[in-house]
Image: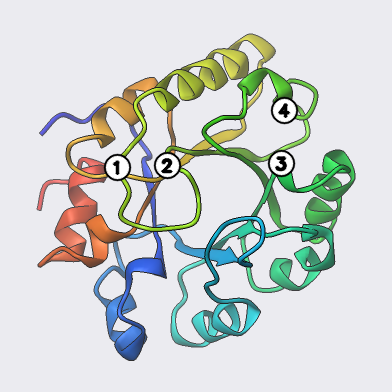
Amino acid sequence: MIILKKNIKVSPSILSANFATLGEEIKKIEGVADYIHLDVMDGHFVPNLTYGLLIGKTLKRITDLPVDSHLMIDNPENFVDDFCEISEIVSIHYEATNHLNRLVNRIKENNTKAFVAINPHTIVELLSDILMDVDGILVMSVNPGFGGQNFIPNTLNKIRQLDEMRKKMGLSFEIEVDGGVNEDTFEAVLKAGADILVTGSYTFGAEDPKKALKILKGIDS
């Protein structure tokens, strides 16, 4: 096993979990996972409809794992305050709001980490004016909307660019990567500069979810 960096964080997405036994599914990852990733989709910003605040509140009742809410929705300004109440991280999309700086600051005023997410086609340079204000950038390495997609190799360049910009500007924001992260892709993602790995089907489709996460974190079983 190659350990590429220390303090790797993993954020399993419940989009791929069995909701009929959600509590049991989460117990399978407790003790190894750093977050629970909540993919909120509205059927407008992305071509899928998932779940909302109610599921987030349910998570708070059944686990102590912090919630990592990824809002793939139009008009996120109408919902961020509610999601800040149940989340440690709230990610909003660069492509979904015309008032990014205002919304980032609003999330932080709620004592929540503010991440900005970008789709695979969005160029990293567009983020240059917001990097000093964010706690993290979430790079979509698949087209958002559905789980189980294949990793888009060109997104590695975006991760590298962000890592270079972070170092050049003397900043400490985290880089989170979401989409197609598994045992075949995670090493390249970490080498490019990622800090947080979002996984869905890789984790909840595994025979032993904790062991699957330990592979990503470089932990010997």
Q: Nearer the viewer, residue 65 or 42?
A: 42
Which labelled disc corresponds to residue 95?
3
Q: Nearer the viewer, residue 24 or 74?
A: 74
Between discs 1 and 3, the one toward the N terminus: 3
Side of 18 where 205 appears, left or right = left
Report the amino acid beneath label 1: Asn
Which labelled disc corresponds to residue 41?
none
Q: Which of 211 and 55 is in front in this view?
A: 55
Which labelled disc corresponds to residue 142?
2
Q: Identify the element where label 2 is drawn.
A: loop
Report the amino acid beneath label 4: Leu
Q: Distance between the Cα atoms at labels 4 and 1?
A: 28 Å
Q: Where is residue 171 in the image (x, y as percent from the top left)?
A: 66, 23
Between discs 1 and 2, the one toward the N terminus: 2
Q: Where is residue 103 in the image (x, y as percent from the top left)?
A: 84, 49
Between discs 4 and 1, the one toward the N terminus: 4
Between discs 4 and 3, the one toward the N terminus: 3
Residue at 12% from the left image edge and 66% from the top image edge: 208
Residue at 37% from the left image edge and 58% from the top image edge: 147
Answer whether labels 4 and 1 touch (C-beta < 8 Å): no
Between discs 2 and 3, the one toward the N terminus: 3
Q: Identify the element where label 1 is drawn.
A: loop
Answer whether labels 1 and 2 touch (C-beta < 8 Å): yes
Residue tagged 1 = 150
Q: Distance between the Cα atoms at labels 4 and 3?
A: 15 Å
Which quarter shows the N terminus?
top left
Report the amino acid beneath label 2: Val
Q: Distance between the Cα atoms at labels 2 and 3?
A: 15 Å
Q: Distance between the Cα atoms at labels 4 and 2?
A: 22 Å
Q: Nearer the viewer, residue 134 or 160?
A: 160
